[in-house]
Image (spheres, rainbow, N blue to C red):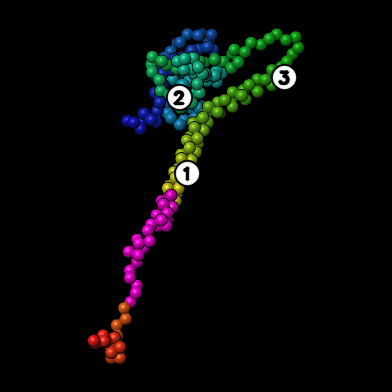
Amino acid sequence: MANVENKHAAVWVALKRLDLNDDRVTALREVHIPRGTKMTTVRQILAHSFRLDIAEVTFKIRNSRGFLIPLNSCIPVNSKQMPYVLEVAKYFQHVNARPRSIAMTVIHRSLKSRLQGIVRRIERLEELLPQIKQKQHDKMTKDIDLLNQKLIFLHKRMQSACMISIKQHRPIEWDAMEQPHKRKVSMPNDKHQLEGHKVPQH
Protein backbone atom coordinates (compact mmCIF):
# COMPACT_ATOMS: atom_id res chain seq x y z
CA MET A 1 0.00 0.00 0.00
CA ALA A 2 2.83 2.40 0.81
CA ASN A 3 4.38 1.92 -2.63
CA VAL A 4 1.08 2.60 -4.35
CA GLU A 5 0.52 5.78 -2.35
CA ASN A 6 4.00 6.99 -3.19
CA LYS A 7 3.45 6.41 -6.91
CA HIS A 8 0.17 8.33 -7.04
CA ALA A 9 -0.88 11.59 -5.39
CA ALA A 10 -4.58 12.05 -4.67
CA VAL A 11 -5.32 15.78 -4.69
CA TRP A 12 -8.58 17.70 -4.42
CA VAL A 13 -9.14 20.28 -7.13
CA ALA A 14 -11.86 22.93 -7.43
CA LEU A 15 -12.66 24.24 -10.91
CA LYS A 16 -13.18 27.84 -12.03
CA ARG A 17 -14.18 28.50 -15.66
CA LEU A 18 -12.75 31.96 -16.20
CA ASP A 19 -12.88 31.30 -19.95
CA LEU A 20 -16.68 31.39 -19.61
CA ASN A 21 -16.52 34.61 -17.55
CA ASP A 22 -17.56 32.62 -14.48
CA ASP A 23 -15.59 33.25 -11.29
CA ARG A 24 -17.48 30.67 -9.23
CA VAL A 25 -16.30 27.19 -8.23
CA THR A 26 -18.32 24.94 -10.51
CA ALA A 27 -16.87 21.52 -9.63
CA LEU A 28 -14.83 19.77 -6.95
CA ARG A 29 -13.14 16.45 -7.66
CA GLU A 30 -10.39 14.21 -6.35
CA VAL A 31 -7.73 13.73 -9.03
CA HIS A 32 -5.05 11.02 -8.99
CA ILE A 33 -1.73 12.22 -10.44
CA PRO A 34 1.05 9.63 -10.99
CA ARG A 35 4.42 10.69 -9.61
CA GLY A 36 7.13 11.33 -12.18
CA THR A 37 4.80 12.09 -15.10
CA LYS A 38 5.37 15.00 -17.46
CA MET A 39 3.61 18.32 -17.07
CA THR A 40 1.71 17.79 -20.34
CA THR A 41 0.38 14.49 -18.99
CA VAL A 42 -0.78 16.21 -15.78
CA ARG A 43 -2.66 18.76 -17.90
CA GLN A 44 -4.34 15.95 -19.82
CA ILE A 45 -5.33 14.19 -16.58
CA LEU A 46 -6.94 17.38 -15.25
CA ALA A 47 -8.67 18.03 -18.56
CA HIS A 48 -10.04 14.49 -18.62
CA SER A 49 -11.22 14.71 -14.99
CA PHE A 50 -13.22 17.89 -15.66
CA ARG A 51 -14.02 17.14 -19.35
CA LEU A 52 -12.18 20.17 -20.68
CA ASP A 53 -10.83 20.92 -24.15
CA ILE A 54 -7.24 22.10 -23.74
CA ALA A 55 -6.83 23.25 -27.34
CA GLU A 56 -7.80 26.89 -26.74
CA VAL A 57 -7.35 27.30 -22.98
CA THR A 58 -4.57 27.45 -20.44
CA PHE A 59 -4.46 26.15 -16.86
CA LYS A 60 -3.39 27.96 -13.69
CA ILE A 61 -3.53 26.28 -10.31
CA ARG A 62 -3.53 28.00 -6.93
CA ASN A 63 -3.21 26.71 -3.38
CA SER A 64 -5.69 27.39 -0.60
CA ARG A 65 -4.01 30.76 0.11
CA GLY A 66 -4.44 31.94 -3.48
CA PHE A 67 -0.81 31.63 -4.57
CA LEU A 68 0.15 30.16 -7.94
CA ILE A 69 2.00 26.84 -7.70
CA PRO A 70 3.77 24.74 -10.37
CA LEU A 71 1.49 22.40 -12.26
CA ASN A 72 3.47 19.16 -12.30
CA SER A 73 3.54 15.67 -10.79
CA CYS A 74 5.19 16.89 -7.55
CA ILE A 75 2.10 18.75 -6.38
CA PRO A 76 1.65 18.07 -2.63
CA VAL A 77 -1.30 16.09 -1.32
CA ASN A 78 -4.07 18.24 0.17
CA SER A 79 -7.52 17.76 1.72
CA LYS A 80 -11.08 18.19 0.52
CA GLN A 81 -11.54 21.09 2.95
CA MET A 82 -8.54 22.95 1.43
CA PRO A 83 -8.58 22.12 -2.29
CA TYR A 84 -6.44 23.55 -5.03
CA VAL A 85 -8.21 25.93 -7.43
CA LEU A 86 -7.79 25.19 -11.13
CA GLU A 87 -8.41 28.32 -13.18
CA VAL A 88 -9.26 27.74 -16.84
CA ALA A 89 -8.71 30.78 -19.03
CA LYS A 90 -8.33 31.60 -22.69
CA TYR A 91 -4.96 32.65 -24.05
CA PHE A 92 -4.51 36.41 -23.53
CA GLN A 93 -7.98 36.57 -21.97
CA HIS A 94 -6.94 39.24 -19.48
CA VAL A 95 -4.95 41.32 -21.96
CA ASN A 96 -6.89 44.46 -22.88
CA ALA A 97 -5.87 45.86 -26.25
CA ARG A 98 -5.72 49.62 -26.62
CA PRO A 99 -7.25 51.27 -29.68
CA ARG A 100 -4.66 52.27 -32.27
CA SER A 101 -4.99 54.59 -35.21
CA ILE A 102 -2.24 52.74 -37.11
CA ALA A 103 -2.49 49.09 -38.12
CA MET A 104 -0.14 47.04 -35.91
CA THR A 105 -0.80 43.54 -37.20
CA VAL A 106 2.88 42.68 -37.54
CA ILE A 107 3.76 43.95 -34.07
CA HIS A 108 0.77 42.14 -32.58
CA ARG A 109 1.84 38.85 -34.14
CA SER A 110 5.41 39.33 -32.95
CA LEU A 111 4.32 40.03 -29.38
CA LYS A 112 1.91 37.12 -29.43
CA SER A 113 4.68 34.80 -30.62
CA ARG A 114 7.03 36.04 -27.88
CA LEU A 115 4.38 35.58 -25.21
CA GLN A 116 3.66 32.07 -26.41
CA GLY A 117 7.39 31.34 -26.26
CA ILE A 118 7.55 32.59 -22.68
CA VAL A 119 4.57 30.40 -21.74
CA ARG A 120 6.27 27.36 -23.28
CA ARG A 121 9.49 28.13 -21.37
CA ILE A 122 7.56 28.39 -18.08
CA GLU A 123 5.84 25.07 -18.77
CA ARG A 124 9.23 23.50 -19.57
CA LEU A 125 10.69 24.78 -16.30
CA GLU A 126 7.73 23.38 -14.37
CA GLU A 127 8.34 20.03 -16.05
CA LEU A 128 12.08 20.05 -15.24
CA LEU A 129 11.60 21.09 -11.60
CA PRO A 130 11.55 17.50 -10.21
CA GLN A 131 14.77 16.66 -12.11
CA ILE A 132 16.50 19.77 -10.76
CA LYS A 133 15.54 18.82 -7.19
CA GLN A 134 16.85 15.27 -7.74
CA LYS A 135 20.18 16.57 -9.08
CA GLN A 136 20.55 18.86 -6.06
CA HIS A 137 19.84 15.92 -3.74
CA ASP A 138 22.40 13.70 -5.55
CA LYS A 139 25.06 16.44 -5.30
CA MET A 140 24.44 16.89 -1.57
CA THR A 141 24.70 13.12 -1.03
CA LYS A 142 27.98 13.00 -2.96
CA ASP A 143 29.43 15.91 -0.94
CA ILE A 144 28.43 14.25 2.34
CA ASP A 145 30.09 10.97 1.30
CA LEU A 146 33.28 12.85 0.38
CA LEU A 147 33.34 14.61 3.77
CA ASN A 148 32.86 11.27 5.55
CA GLN A 149 35.84 9.81 3.66
CA LYS A 150 37.98 12.79 4.65
CA LEU A 151 36.95 12.42 8.31
CA ILE A 152 37.86 8.73 8.30
CA PHE A 153 41.26 9.51 6.73
CA LEU A 154 42.00 12.26 9.29
CA HIS A 155 40.94 9.97 12.15
CA LYS A 156 43.39 7.29 11.00
CA ARG A 157 46.19 9.88 10.70
CA MET A 158 45.50 11.14 14.22
CA GLN A 159 45.61 7.58 15.58
CA SER A 160 48.95 6.93 13.84
CA ALA A 161 50.40 10.21 15.17
CA CYS A 162 49.31 9.34 18.73
CA MET A 163 51.01 5.89 18.54
CA ILE A 164 54.28 7.43 17.29
CA SER A 165 54.18 10.08 20.05
CA ILE A 166 53.67 7.41 22.75
CA LYS A 167 56.63 5.36 21.51
CA GLN A 168 58.94 8.40 21.42
CA HIS A 169 58.16 9.52 24.98
CA ARG A 170 58.05 6.22 26.91
CA PRO A 171 60.87 5.42 29.51
CA ILE A 172 64.07 3.71 28.38
CA GLU A 173 63.47 0.88 30.93
CA TRP A 174 60.43 -0.22 28.89
CA ASP A 175 62.65 -0.85 25.85
CA ALA A 176 65.13 -2.78 28.01
CA MET A 177 62.33 -4.95 29.35
CA GLU A 178 60.94 -5.59 25.90
CA GLN A 179 64.36 -6.46 24.32
CA PRO A 180 65.60 -10.04 25.02
CA HIS A 181 69.06 -10.39 26.59
CA LYS A 182 71.36 -10.78 23.61
CA ARG A 183 74.67 -11.29 25.52
CA LYS A 184 75.94 -14.90 25.26
CA VAL A 185 78.00 -16.69 27.93
CA SER A 186 80.89 -18.67 26.46
CA MET A 187 81.46 -22.08 27.99
CA PRO A 188 84.98 -23.67 28.02
CA ASN A 189 85.17 -26.48 25.55
CA ASP A 190 88.67 -27.98 25.96
CA LYS A 191 90.95 -29.02 28.81
CA HIS A 192 93.26 -26.03 28.61
CA GLN A 193 90.38 -23.68 28.95
CA LEU A 194 89.15 -25.61 32.00
CA GLU A 195 92.57 -25.49 33.64
CA GLY A 196 92.85 -21.80 33.00
CA HIS A 197 89.62 -21.25 34.87
CA LYS A 198 90.58 -23.19 38.00
CA VAL A 199 90.14 -21.38 41.23
CA PRO A 200 93.50 -20.99 43.08
CA GLN A 201 93.72 -22.85 46.39
CA HIS A 202 95.01 -21.08 49.51
Check disc 3 and give the amino acid type. Val
Other-residue count near label 1 (Cα within 10 Å), few / some / many at <14 / 14–19 / ≥20 = few
Where does label 1 land, which residue? 146
Q: CA distance from mark 2 to mark 1?
A: 32 Å
- The secondary structure that most of the magenta stretch takes on is helix
Check disc 1 and give the amino acid type. Leu
Q: Quadrant of residue 13?
A: top left
Q: Position of residue 49 (x, y in %)?
A: 44, 20
Circle nearer the viewer, 3 or 1: 1
Q: In the image, is residue 49 above or below residue 127? A: above
Q: In the image, is residue 101 above or below residue 59? A: above
Q: In the image, is residue 31 above or below residue 185? A: above
Position of the N terminus, as image quadrant, is top left
Tell me which label, 3 or 1, sits earlier in the chain.
3
Where does label 3 land, which residue? 106
Q: In the image, is residue 68 above or below residue 192? A: above
The reply, left or right, for residue 123 in relation to residue 65 is right
Q: Secondary structure at mark 3?
A: helix
Part of the protein shown in magenta: 158-184
